[in-house]
Amino acid sequence: MTSSSEQRDLLVEIGTEELPPKALRTLSQAFADHFAAALNQARLEFGSLRPFASPRRLAVLVGGLAEQTPDQDIERRGPALRAAFDEDGCPTRAAEGFARSCGVAVEDLDKLETDKGSWLVFRSHQAGQPAARLIPELLHQALESLPIPRRMRWGDGEARFVRPVHWTVLL
């Protein structure tokens, strides 16, 4: 849980040409649902999420959005020690492959002793990321996931949406 000094409200608003009236409620709710799912997947905590829609706007108001994701301690268990090292104590291909997948040398891996055996393990600390850096990509994911059967393209760009977008607000 983050303190109130680390939370902000976020308004995401997209101004378009007139949206299809029959699809307005569906688009609005889907936009909110997909944006909430993207925030959750990115581990960005928030208090509330409220969709808004009008014929020329789709919007979501996110209340109590954390300013950054929480720090995370990562622990990946690799091969058992008996499979990771040969009789001479040299790393096997299993140990080297696990170290390579973690982006470190075999010497930088730790050993983990459990009642089920001994394992190679990779431990690292991932600092939280600022919400401002993550939100553009999360917004893109949410918009790409909308149930739009036929998307329009306009202008010279490659952007596609149900209707041409005239402006966006992230506040």
Image: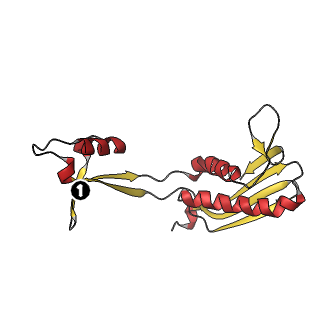
SS for dot 1: strand
Q: Is residue 110 above or below residue 152?
A: below
**Residue at the spot 84% in from the left edge and 48% down from the top edge:** 16
Answer yes or no: is residue 9 visible: no
**Residue at the spot 58% in from the left edge and 47% down from the top edge:** 133
**Residue at the spot 26% in from the left edge and 45% down from the top edge:** 94
Residue 92 vs residue 154, the one in the foreground: 92
Neighbours of disc 1 within 10 Å: few (<14), some (14-19), many (20+): some
Residue 121 vs residue 57, the one in the foreground: 121
What residue does disc 1 label? 119
Q: Is residue 45 above or below residue 124?
A: below
In this picture, residue 120 sits left or right of residue 90: right
| Residue 117, horizontal then vertical, whole percent | 20, 62
| Residue 134, horizontal then vertical, whole percent | 58, 49
| Residue 12, horizontal then vertical, whole percent | 72, 55
Q: Amino acid at mark 1?
A: Trp
Residue 80 vs residue 122, the one in the foreground: 80
In this picture, residue 79 sits left or right of residue 17: left
